Amino acid sequence: MVYVTRKLHFCAAHRLHDASLSREENERRFGRCANLHGHNYLLEVTYAGEPDEATGMLVHLSNLKQIIKQRVVDELDHKNLGEDVPVFRDVAPTLEMIAKYAWGRLDGAVPNATLHRIRLHQDHTLWADYYGEAGSGS
Amino acid sequence: MMYLTFNAAFNAVHKLWNPKFDAARNIELFAECANRHGHLYEVEVTVGAEVAGRRPVVMDRAEIHRIIDDVLAPKLEDADMNTAFVQDHFMSTGENIVREIWKLVQPELPGGVALAAVRLVSTPNNSFVYFGDDEALACH
């Protein structure tokens, strides 16, 4: 088993906000993040599997870049997540839920490779890791 | 399980010294680390919880700031690692410090949030990770 990780960046705006809560309660829970603001997100996508015998590759890296770009980055880049991306009208566009969204978009997207981990960095002080419903990363 | 990692950095001083040994033996064991010196220690805390629409975060960001500002910083900022946790005979190695940080953070987490890992980076070349006693979590 070998693991291949591809990184891509995107920039987006969001705010952490629960419409069922008061403004004060939103600010208590989410602090400054309750205001609209933006991040340069760094997305790391890791697939696992056995390399193809003929090519020696698990996945062609430029194909992998295109898959991630089309399925995730193009959907989110330079968007106001809570308004421009339909799925985040009902689900808060937190770092965690964006990571889970990326998992759903990329799981099964690469033939003969298994999606192992989505790591999404909001900045250099905070990141989320998701290994899927069943995964604890072991 | 969704995992969230946050980090913070603290300046602190320490030396490696076992008072049971004489100076010659300490210097033999710990070399230059037997002299008082400092690091900008980076602490990475990984927490885990299930997330879904009604609970879209592993942990509220205000709680993360509370852990950093009210739990970690008072112990670690400008601290002497040899006395910050235990007054006597604390060997302030990365291995021991990372487990003390686990003990500090674990009881402060909100309900339903599991501590998955604590990582301590003492220099760009040296780091230490502790997953508690549950080796099944040793995944990062």
Image (cartoon, grey):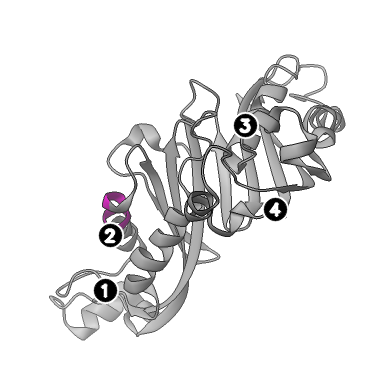
- Indicate yes or no whether the magenta region holds residue A72: no
Q: Is residue A49 something one can see in this rendering? A: no
**Disc 4 residue type?**
Leu
Residue plotted at (57% across, 53% down): A126
Residue B72 higher or lower than B87, as above or below: above
CA–CA distance in space, label 1 to label 3? 43 Å
Q: Three-letter amino acid code at disc 3?
A: Val
Residue at screen point 70% across, 42% down = A43
- The residue range painted magenta reads B102-107
Q: Work out whether residue B81 or residue A96 is closer to the camera in this orientation and state it.
A: A96
User: Would you say B93 lies left or right of A9 here?
Assistant: left
- Quarter where residue B76 is shown: bottom left
Residue at the spot of label 4? A36
Q: Amino acid at mark 1?
A: Ala
In three-dimensional space, the C-alpha distance between marks 4 and 3, rounded to whole angstroms, equals 16 Å
Kindly give the residue lying farthest to the front in the view shown. A22
Q: Position of residue B19 (x, y in %)?
A: 16, 78
Q: Position of residue A108 (x, y in %)?
A: 70, 16
Q: Same chain, marks 2 and 3?
A: no
Question: Which residue is denoted by mark 2 in the rendering?
Answer: B100
